[in-house]
Image (cartoon, helix red, strand yellow):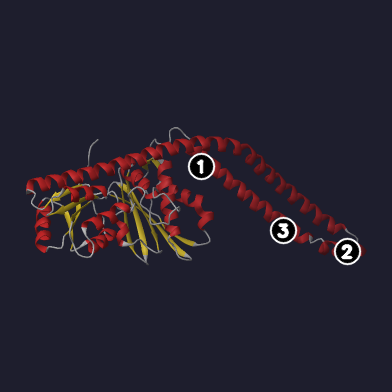
Amino acid sequence: MTIRKHIGKILVVDDSKAVRDLLAGLLRDAGHDISLAEDGRQGWQIIQHKQIDLIISDLEMPVLDGFGLCRLVKENPDYKNIYFILLSTKDSTASKVKGLEIGADDYMGKGIAESEFLARIKAGLRIRALEKELEEKRVTLFQHEKMASIAQLAAGVAHEINNPIAFIASNLRSLNGYCEKLTECIFTLLKEIKPESLDDIEEIRKRLKINFIIQDSAELIEESLDGAERICHIVQTLKDSSRVDQDACVPTDINVCLDQVLGQIWEEIKDKVTINKDYSPLPLAMCQPLPLQQTLSHLLTNAYQALEGNGIITLNTWAENGGVSLSITDNGIGIPAKDIDRIFEPFYTTHEVGAGMGLGLSLAYDTIVNKHHGTISVQSRPGQETIFTLHIPIQA
């Protein structure tokens, strides 16, 4: 397994300014991104607002000591994988055991040599990077297994639905033609009725609401045909999702792909959102259609869910730098700054428990970056707007 080059985001927590400055200098010289805190409480606040890979915490501090901070971090599912090092002047076995028992990953004395200190920091960051990579591979494997199961289910469902819905659609078209002929016959016969019978016929016509029935029958058939066509579209989507060659790259028009996804979720979102489109003519890009559609569907659904009341989603596409780009902008609640750096992490979610597994954006990242060799980024102003921007090379 190849570990990606990793610049550590490290938090140093110590009530001594001299120690903080010394450690920060060593770590910055080693190329790391450093945050500083004077005690455990301040450190805990930083952890909740900034992505941290490794924590170096003094053991004895006012307000919240190193043991207390370590316990908070390791008991929280969002932060438990942060590599935690306790640093102390105490070199007692009891302190080391206690620290390791509450979840600390390492324990160092303040008299440790500089070379050993940096080596153990490097080892901790390497472990953290390995854990991240293993988690990403686990998510990818989970996705492949899930897609295989979905493909098998989709093939069966599509087969069972396809014939009945074809019968229904065909019968509705025939029924529509029959109703048109019956309506023409009724109005033709009315013209041939004797004048002395017109009043009786008109009374029957009003009592039975014949005019309304004729008009409403046509509308009912039209709506039913529309519903049947939607089901046919769903069946076709299921068939597409069950293809064994779904991971093959094919020339794809991103504008068409975006509209197809929008059509699939339109019934769910149409009463709450206004869609603004600004598409540019695009060259065909080599894409995996199904994973790409799943990514776009997730981003559009996220944008819709972020809206408060009726909102606006703006879709832009353009060609640049040997590829195609698209952006999805919503004027919803936005993403807090503390979450921006973590939203593409597997299982990280800002939704309530049970509202999602936190896999959607991590899989979107995998699809765009790993499968299509492109880029995906996000910008957000809380309370104003969020913009997801994707770029896909023409040749993946």
Disc 2 residue type (three-letter): Leu
Where does the image place residue 389, in percent across and percent down from the top left?
A: 34, 54
Disc 3 residue type (three-letter): Gln
Q: What residue is shown at x 56% (from left), y 38% (from top)?
A: 157
Which of labels 3 and 2 is toward the front? 3
Where does the image place residue 348, in percent across and percent down from the top left?
A: 35, 51
Q: Earlier in the sequence, mark 1 or mark 3?
A: 3
On residue 215, which mark appears?
A: 3
- Comparing 238 with 308, the one in front is 308
User: Outermost residue, top direction?
Assistant: 244
On residue 378, which mark appears?
A: none
Judge the density around disc 2: few (<14), some (14-19), many (≥20) Cα neighbours within 10 Å: few
* Label 1: which secondary element: helix
- Comparing 268 with 257, the one in front is 268
Q: What residue is shown at x 55% (from left), y 35% (from top)?
A: 156
Q: Quadrant of the C terminus?
A: top left
Where does the image place residue 365, in percent across and percent down from the top left?
A: 34, 47
Disc 1 residue type (three-letter): Thr
Judge the density around disc 1: few (<14), some (14-19), many (≥20) Cα neighbours within 10 Å: some
* Real-space Cα separation, disc 1 to disc 3, in angstroms: 34 Å
110 left or right, relative to 365: left
On residue 237, which mark appears?
A: 1
Dots 1, 3 in contact, CB < 8 A: no
User: Does residue 298 sit above or below 160 in this rendering?
Assistant: below
* Real-space Cα separation, disc 2 to disc 1, in angstroms: 54 Å
* Label 3: which secondary element: helix
User: Outermost residue, right direction?
Assistant: 196
On residue 198, which mark appears?
A: 2
